[in-house]
Amino acid sequence: MSLSGKVALVTGATSGIGRATAELLAERGARVLVSGRDGQRGAEAVRGIRAAGGEAEFVPAALSGAADARALARRAEELAGPLDILVNNAAIAVFGATAAIAEDDFDACHALNVKVPFFLVGAVAPGMAERGGGVIVNVSTMVAGFGTAGSAVYASSKAALELLTKSWAAEYGPRGVRVNAVAPGPTRTEGTTAQYGTQRLEALGAQAPARRVAEAREIAAAIGFLAGPEGAFVHGAILPVDGGRTAV
């Protein structure tokens, strides 16, 4: 129970990688605040964690900007006390030819994927620093590190998040706050299966040395490593969890 006594907030935690992460952190002893838009799925995630012996509460949040991020941080700390772990997982993916992307879609993607984590960290990290410790893990993507046609909007938002990860490590690391990121490859979730279809998703996974698609739990395990004491000397890292895709 390496996270016993810790309070963790996971955004986008009602499904996919976020839910798997919330479950894993709870298994390791953390009190987990499950954040998301869908109250029914949030309740299901909390019930599952509690049924397994963990501690969790649902904190509803529709995140689109600074005010939403600050309100979430405030509600989370009112409910459970100061946060020890923040996992910035909530995101949307916008794909398509550059000339065909609508401005509203561009703005929505960068608002949730960049602006919300920026202001959520701004609301949470200073308190962590004052207390002398805390962990922030950002969820990026492998395509933040190389060019792919049709991914310009989504990839650029995650590339910004990776640079923010390093900037925050420099800013808050000297005061005991570790900030890192994971960069997943193709991962089997409800969202990716709906977006790509099983066949295309498997084809994407086959391009990596691992020759398969990741399970959400495998990405959560990497997040758990960075969030726990095992990752105590890791600061400002972008950990690829992509089956080796970016290595070839």
Image (tube, grey):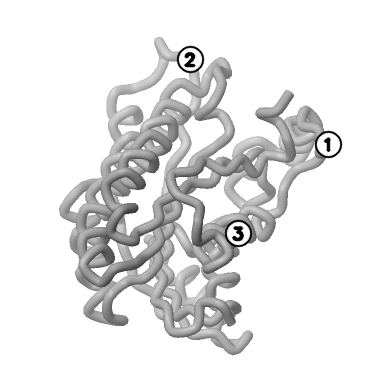
Cα separation, mark 3 vs mark 2, equals: 31 Å
Q: Identify the amino acid type marked 2.
A: Ala
Q: Identify the amino acid type marked 3.
A: Ala
Q: Mark 3 and mark 2 in contact? Answer it, CB < 8 Å.
A: no
Label 1, on which residue? 211
Disc sitting over residue 242 in the figure: none
Dot 2, how many residues are within 10 Å of its Cα: few (below 14), some (14-19), or many (20+)? few
Label 3, on which residue? 220
Residue at 37 percent of width and 32 percent of height? 160
Q: Does residue 3 appear anywhere in the picture?
A: yes
Q: Residue furthest left?
A: 67
Q: Identify the amino acid type marked 1.
A: Arg
Label 2, on which residue? 97
Q: Position of residue 226 (x, y in %)?
A: 53, 58
Camera-nearest label, 2 or 1: 1
Look at the picture and state if 86 lies above or below 247.
Answer: below
Q: Nearer the viewer, residue 157 or 180?
A: 180
Dot 1, how many residues are within 10 Å of its Cα: few (below 14), some (14-19), or many (20+)? some
Helix, strand or loop under label 2: loop
Q: Residue furthest top?
A: 99
Camera-nearest label, 3 or 2: 3
